[in-house]
Structure formats: structure tokens, C-alpha cells
Amino acid sequence: MKLISFLHEGQPAYGLVNGDKVLNLSPILGAQAPDLKTLIAKNLFSAAAEAAQTHPATLAFDQLTLLPVIPNPGQIFCIGLNYGEHVQETGNKVTEKPVIFLRLPASQVAHNQDILRPAESHRLDYEAEIAIVIGKGGRRIKEEDAWEHIAGYACYNDGSVRDWQVATSQWTPGKNFYQTGGFGPWMVTADEIPAGKVMRLQTVLNGQVLQDTTTDKMIHSIPRQIAYISTFTPLSPGDVIVTGTPGGVGNKREPQIFMKPGDVCEIVVDAIGTLRNTIRDE
């Protein structure tokens, strides 16, 4: 299934994508699950599938105002320096443990929405990533059990304001400017992507492919990320882990490439779909 969050008549809603149409699940499952995060927490995927068999999908996908896939995540963990080419281009070293930083929900936008270039900097960079959404929470999850804790997958653009990121040893400011990261267009449920499936990940900026890799080149695998993070804090349904970007970021190119107003940035994952955002000045 492909599940989305969106606004319907001005109110947050969620639904199931069927081709170019969407079934609004909010009035059907609202009493049980007022939002997608709750549906995940209660494992109501079967109820959503049953609703799709008995209710027509009537909303046009391309006319909806989408929200980030999980608009209200409890935690957003991001993995830094997780592909060899990116480690090399940044002049860093491979670390024994994953590099972790956090994003705030307010730093995200949905598919087909504008990513904002802040007034304080024009060094707004792209980062193609795959986000996983936690389905079953837990503490000290074992690597061999980690796949069972994933609800689904989405595309993610970890938009980064580079000069603010490297101003100190802490990356938080440059990774959290308001509405600089894209999260969407939907969550593909884990039953449609086999555990360990190799996925192709790309950034396409104004039609030009600038990043292109496959997930088998991750330094720290998805199960290892889940195991490591859940060691120091419990993971909960709806939490998001953004799994790392490959080489080819704009900041390390010669000449450098930064996103500017009018640009169209697409994050393409073959097993998920395409996250598309335009860029404008805040």
C-alpha cells in the first residue's frame, strides 16, 4: 500500500493511494485511528486494505495538499556519512558507529511543496535519502529482528544549509532551517519491499542526475541503524530514520551547485517513487 497524509477541507487527514486517486481513510477509520501515525501504532493496515475493497477512491491525488508522510513524528533520526563516496568527498573517515543527528518536524515539507532557501544563506544543498518509518517500537532491538520493526519507506531530501552546518562541530542548525527538508510523497508499506531489497537512489536537479547509488553501498545497514539507535533510546511507532546520502552533494562539486529559487529537485527511489519539490526564497 501507499499511504499519505494530506489536508482535506482544511483539516489533517490520511489516505490510501490507488493510481491517481486517493481513498480518504480518516472518516472510515477515524474513531480507531485519527492519523497515520496511530494507524501504524495500532497495526491497522488490514483495516485500511479492507476499506479499499469496500469504498471507492474519489480524491484526485494531484489536487491534494500533501503533508509530510508522518506530520507528527515523535523522533526524526538522521544518519550522516553513511556511503563511502560521501565520506571521501567530505574528507572524513568511516566511523565504527553510525553518525547520528536529529531533525525537527518544522524543518520538513511535503511532496510538491516549496523547499525554502533562508535569507541567512544561499548555500542550500540537496541530499537524496531513504526514510524508514518505525512500525513496532522497542528498546535494544537486535539487528536480526530489525526488519520486523519497519512500517514502511519513503523518499527524503535532507536539505542542508551548508555554512550553518559546518559553523561548529554540531550540525543541528544547518540541518533544521524551517521547511528545508522534503519527506514524501507517500509511505510504501514494508510488505511491498522485501527485507534487504537493494534500492536505487538518485537526486535529479532540473533534469540533471547529481546523485546515483544503491542501498547495498551503505556503510551502516538499516538493521544496524535500528539496533544502534534503539540502544540509547526507545523507538516508537511513527518515528523516522533517515538513512544517509551518497556522494555527489552540491557543496563538494567543482563548481559547487546549490539549490536556488525556481529549481526543481527530485529524489527518486525505484522501489518507492519520486519526491518532487520546487525551491523558493523564504
Image (cartoon, rainbow, N blue to C red):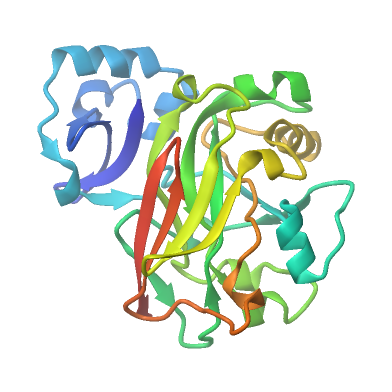
Residue 216 x/y as whole percent: 67, 38
Left or right of 257: which side holds 93? right
Front position in the image: 124 or 231: 124
x, y percent for residue 140: 79, 27
User: Which image quarter holds the N terminus?
Assistant: top left
* Residue visible at 68% across and 35% down in the picture: 222
**Above or below for 72 versus 255:** above
Residue 197: quadrant of the picture: top right
Residue sitting at 85 percent across and 46 percent down? 97
When asked about the image quadrant of residue 149, the answer is top right
- Image quarter (top left, top right, bottom left or bottom right) of the C terminus: bottom left
Q: Picture coordinates of residue 10 (x, y %)?
A: 18, 51
Residue 110 at x, y = what percent?
36, 54
4 sits to left or right of 189: left
* Number of dots carrying numbers: 0
Corner quadrant of residue 236? top right
Relative side of 26 to 256, left or right: left
Residue at left 76%, top 25%? 143
Give me the residue at 41% from left, 47% from top: 71
Q: Is residue 267 left or right of residue 278?
A: right
